[in-house]
């Protein structure tokens, strides 16, 4: 298993921090990708943040009522090694190729 | 990291561990950071996040944010910084996050990194090792699966190296970092999670090519992720009684022509396998070297099994671009069944 940290993302409009209103997950929860993790409030609005990965919640970066700056650790997941931060899809073990070619050893005589 | 040092019953500690390629690279970086205080690791997301592929996982926590640090998303600036640090006496190990984003840094690499030793009449080496997650096979978006080795190998002043398994990854990365010259280190990202035995104490040699599997009927010459497919093709060929020698080039510049010629001189047939597009790919260089050395020995023209001359496709179309075991077998059949006219 590997740990994957998810920092508070840039919420746009030049906002630099947000207050944790309510956590929707607890340490130990298994979270699916795009599940709502937390509701945060900025000076503009309250927004719900979806999970970028599937994994088990290992740590919460802040408690409800606390302020978090953009880029600070928001939440840390335990994820399978091969899904940690990956771009793209890790190939499954190569399937046994179907044989469509028969080879013959060479008949070298010179 | 799940690997730990194991102690045998007689109390001697063993140096062989089962590691993934990604863990082996992480270990190599940590060991070099430990060994040389001049060494620095930097790039996009290598610090806090620990790398998009976890290759730099834990290094910032262990060695501090002065030696392992995140950079802005600006590849040209990453390499420009590396040049300045190298001139100032550091040993920079930058990362460019993905092969296709080395293109914005091309100018720095070709115009500065590759030339400083020449330009300074030998007074300023560039002990930079640029790590680049390379090649396709993970169905990533555009510009995340390019095979760039021929670009770099064509530039005099750069060394180019590409490991094919965890043991090779560990020792080749350490050798690259210790090398006084700039090395472009191409990591086969489709192999990052492939585990194998790594002997941390014994490298088995890190210079030149290595013969991975001995054989007598033909030689397959390959590197990076394609070595594994070459071995799988060799396994299938063995069922038909065909003994295939598989050579892992490892160093794509300078190319170890002697080992290639030694192998093909014995087997007298050669197939070069690479993911990159065919035209002006490195397979053409390898093929030309074989022909220059062994024209009279060859029993068949050197065959290339490569990607097609199209931009690297993203998604599932990648499967068509990257040589399959089947296509490698067809290439082998062409050299085995060739008859002079």
Image (spheres, helix red, strand yellow):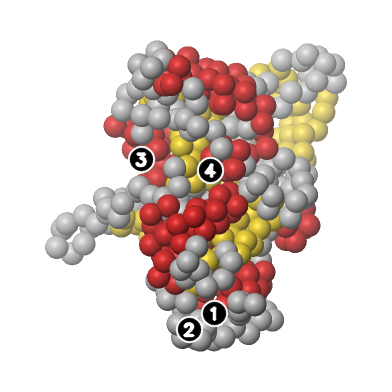
Measured in 3D between alpha carbons, the distance from the residue under mark 2 to the one under mark 1, in whole angstroms, is: 17 Å
Judge depth for marks 1 and 4 and give the one in front: 1
Q: Nearer the viewer, residue B22 or B172?
A: B172
The residue that appears at 68% across and 53% down in the rendered structure is: B278
Question: Can marks 3 and 1 be said to lie on one chain?
Answer: yes
The residue singled out by tag 4 in the image is B186
Tell me if A4 is positioned left or right of A47 in this view: left
Tell me the element at label 3.
helix
Tell me the element at label 2.
loop
Q: Looking at the image, can residue B133 be seen? A: no
Measured in 3D between alpha carbons, the distance from the residue under mark 3 to the one under mark 1, in whole angstroms, is: 34 Å
Measured in 3D between alpha carbons, the distance from the residue under mark 4 to the one under mark 3, in whole angstroms, is: 14 Å
The residue singled out by tag 3 in the image is B175
The quadrant of the image that shows the C terminus of chain B is bottom right
The residue that appears at 57% across and 77% down in the rendered structure is: B336
Judge depth for marks 3 and 1 and give the one in front: 1
Disc 2 crowd, CA 10 A, few/some/many (<14, 14-19, 20+) = few
Mark 1 near mark 4, Cβ–Cβ under 8 Å? no
Tell me the element at label 4.
strand
Disc 1 crowd, CA 10 A, few/some/many (<14, 14-19, 20+) = many
Q: Earlier in the sequence, mark 1 or mark 4?
A: 4
The residue that appears at 26% across and 50% down in the rendered structure is: B201
Mark 3 near mark 1, Cβ–Cβ under 8 Å? no
Q: Nearer the viewer, residue A43 or B259?
A: B259
Judge depth for marks 2 and 1 and give the one in front: 2
Tell me if B263 is positioned left or right of A86 in this view: left
Judge depth for marks 2 and 3 and give the one in front: 2
């Amino acid at each position: 298993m590997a740990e994957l940290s998810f920092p508070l993302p840039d919420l746009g409009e030049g906002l630099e921090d947000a207050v944790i209103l309510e956590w929707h997950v607890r340490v130990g929860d298994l979270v699916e990708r795009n599940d709502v993790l937390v509701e945060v409030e900025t000076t503009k609005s309250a927004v719900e943040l979806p999970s970028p990965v599937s994994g088990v919640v290992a740590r919460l970066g802040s408690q409800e009522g606390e302020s978090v700056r953009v880029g600070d650790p928001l939440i840390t997941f335990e994820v399978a090694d091969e899904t940690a931060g990956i771009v793209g899809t890790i190939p499954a073990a190569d399937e046994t190729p179907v044989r469509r070619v028969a080879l013959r050893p060479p008949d070298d005589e010179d | 990291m799940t690997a730990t040092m194991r102690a045998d019953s007689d109390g001697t500690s063993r140096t062989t561990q089962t590691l993934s390629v990604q863990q082996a690279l992480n270990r190599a970086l940590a060991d070099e950071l430990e060994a040389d205080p001049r060494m620095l690791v930097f790039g996009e997301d290598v610090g806090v996040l620990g790398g998009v592929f976890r290759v730099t996982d834990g290094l910032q926590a262990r060695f501090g944010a002065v030696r392992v640090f995140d950079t802005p998303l600006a590849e040209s600036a990453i390499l420009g910084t590396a040049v300045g640090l190298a001139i100032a006496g550091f040993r920079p190990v930058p990362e460019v996050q993905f092969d296709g984003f080395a293109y914005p840094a091309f100018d720095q690499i070709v115009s500065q990194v590759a030339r400083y030793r020449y330009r300074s009449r030998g007074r300023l080496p560039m002990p930079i090792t640029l790590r680049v997650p390379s090649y396709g096979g993970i169905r990533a978006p555009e510009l995340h699966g390019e095979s760039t080795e021929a670009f770099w190998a064509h530039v005099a002043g750069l060394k180019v190296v590409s490991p094919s398994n965890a043991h090779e990854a560990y020792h080749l990365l350490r050798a690259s970092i210790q090398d006084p010259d700039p090395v472009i280190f191409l990591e086969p990202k489709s192999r990052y999670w492939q585990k194998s035995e790594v002997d941390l104490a014994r490298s088995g040699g890190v210079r030149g090519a290595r013969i991975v599997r001995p054989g007598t009927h033909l030689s397959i010459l390959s590197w990076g992720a394609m070595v594994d497919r070459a071995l799988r093709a060799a396994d299938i060929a063995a069922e038909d009684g065909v003994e295939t020698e598989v050579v892992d080039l490892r160093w794509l510049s300078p190319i170890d022509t002697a080992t290639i010629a030694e192998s093909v001189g014995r087997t007298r047939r050669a197939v070069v396998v690479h993911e990159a597009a065919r035209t002006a790919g490195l397979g053409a260089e390898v093929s030309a070297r074989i022909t220059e050395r062994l024209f009279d020995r060859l029993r068949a023209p050197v065959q290339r099994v490569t990607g097609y001359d199209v931009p690297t496709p993203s998604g599932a179309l990648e499967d068509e671009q990257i040589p399959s075991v089947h296509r490698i077998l067809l290439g082998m059949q062409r050299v085995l069944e060739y008859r002079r006219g």
